[in-house]
Image: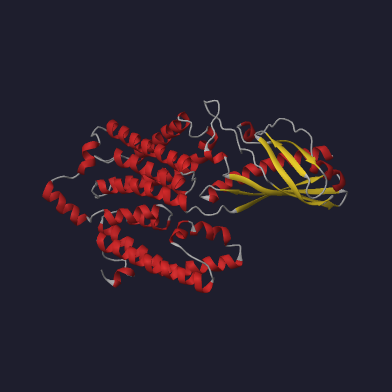
Amino acid sequence: MRLSDLWRWNGTIERGPYLAWGLILFAIKFNIDRFLSQKLFLRSWSIVDYQHAGQMLWDVLPSFREGAYYSTLVAASLPFLWAGIVLTLKRLRSADLPLWLVVLFVIPILKLVLFVALSVIPSSRMRAERRLRSGDVKGWLGVLVPQHPVGSAVTGVAVSLAYGVAAVWIGATLLRTYAWTLFVGVPFCMGFCSVFLYSYHRPRTWPECFVQILTTLGIASVALLIFAFEGIICLFMAAPLALIIASFGGAIAYKIQSSRWWHGSELFCCVLLVIAVAQPIESSTAPAAPLLTVRTTIEINAPPERVWQNVVSFSELPPPNEWLFRLGIAYPRRATIFGVGPGAIRRCEFSTGAFIEPIEIWQAPSLLKFSVTSNPAPMEEWTPYTKVHPPHLDGFLESRGGQFRLTRLPGDRTRLEGTTWYRHRMWPVVYWQWWSDFIIHRIHLRVLTHIKHLSE
C-alpha cells in the first residue's frame, strides 16, 4: 500500500490493498461527513444516509439551506471521489478489465457491485499462474454451462429468469420496496448474467447478445404476468428503463467475453450476491418520498363567478376517449360537495374509487384549496386474471392536496389553474415522475375541459 496510489492513476493495485484502501477511505469520509453535519449544520449523519444522499440532494437543491448542507458534503467528498476513481482504474488494469467500467463507481447500487467484484477478482497475473498450475481455465461454472450455443443461451435465460423473478417477488412483495435495487440492480444483473453465461465458452457477436437480452426480458415479463406479480400497464411503464439497464449490463458482459479476461466464477457470484444483500439494506433505509407538484392551466370564456360553481362540484363526465384511461389508469367521473366554506367535504369520484378532500381555503370565486385524506388505487391493471393488485397500488402514489385558482381576464374571461401535490415512493424518482406527471396532467385536462364546457 502506497500513498501515491491515491492520486496517480498509472500502474496497478492488487485486490487486498484495494479493499483496504476502500475501507480506510470510507471510514475517514464518514467521520468527516458526521463532523460537518454536527458542527456546522447541527444535524445527525449515519451510514445509512449514504444510501439515499444522492436522491435527497436532487430533491432539496431548490432550498437554499438544504442545498448548502448537501453542497458542503459534496465538496468534502471530491478528494475521496478522485482517490476512489484512481484506485478503481488501477484495479481494473490489474484485473485486465475494460477501464470504462470505472463509470459504475458513481452509479448507486452498481458501485457496490463493482467494489465487491474488484475486491474478489484476482489479477491477470494470478489467474495466469493458476491456469499453469491446474490447467483449469473455466472454473466450476464452465462445467455447468453447456458448450452448445443453444444450451448456453437457454442456461443464461433460465438462470437470469429465476434470479429476476425471485428478486422482484422479494423486493415488491416481501420488502415492499420499489427502488434502485429493483429497477436498476435487478435488470443490470439479468442482462449481465444472461450474456455472461451465453458467451462463457466462446465469444458471441453483439447482435446475438442483444437478442439474448431481449429474450430474457421478454420471458421475465411474461413470467411476472403469469404469476400475477404485475399487470401489463406497469410492465409497459418499466420496460424502457429495464431495457436500457439490462442492455448496459449485457454490454459489460459482452466486452468481458471479447477481452483477454478469464471467465472466472468469482464475478458471476459477486454480481448475484451483492444485489441480494442490497435489497434488505435499501428497504430498511428508504428515504422520505419527495413532494411533487403538477400544474395545468386552461382559459374559459366565462366569468369566474360562473366557473366557480362548476369547480366546487361538477356533473357526470362523459366516458373517456383518451387511450391512457381506456388502458386502466384511474380517471375522474364526477365531484360533489357537502357543506360550504372551510371544513366542507368534497368527494371526487374516480373510476377506481373516491378521493376525500376536506376544504382548507374557500375564497369564492378565486381559490379553492383542499387536502386529501383518502386515495383510491391509481389504476386497474390489465391481466389475464380476474384481478391483480400489486403492492405499488397501495400507498406508493398518493395525492396530498390540490387547489383550483381562478384569475379574471379581460373580456369577462377566466384563467383556471389546477394544481396537485403528490408523493410517490418509487425510485429513480426522475424516471417515474415523468410517468406520474404525465398521468396527472391528463387527469387535470379531463376535469378542466369539462368545467370549461359546463361554464361556456
| Residue at position x 66%, y 44% in the image | 441
| Residue 262 can be seen in this image | yes
* Rendering quarter of residue 455: top right
92 shown above or below 236? below
Which residue is outermost to the bottom? 39
| Residue at the image point whose x is 65% and y is 41% from the top | 375
Total tally of numbered discs in the picture: 0
Quarter of the image with the C terminus is: top right
Residue furthest left in the image: 133
Colour style of the rendered protein structure:
secondary structure
Q: Position of residue 294 (x, y in %)?
A: 66, 49
Pick the residue in front: 221 or 289: 289
Asked whether, in this view, residue 292 is left or right of residue 446, the answer is left
Q: Position of residue 198 (x, y in %)?
A: 30, 38
- Looking at the image, is 14 positioned above or below residue 347? below
Q: Please state if 83 lies on the left or on the right of 2 as rendered.
A: right
- Asked if residue 301 can be seen in this view, the reply is no
Image quadrant for the N terminus? bottom left
In the rendered image, residue 332, in percent from the top left (x then y), is placed at: 70, 37
Residue beneath the point at 71% across and 30% down? 319
Along the viewing direction, whichever of 276 and 8 lies nearer the viewer: 276
Residue 454 place in picture, x, y as percent: 82, 37
| Residue at the image position 21 percent from the left and 42 percent from the top | 140
Q: Quadrant of residue 377?
A: top right
Q: Is residue 233 left or right of residue 401?
A: left
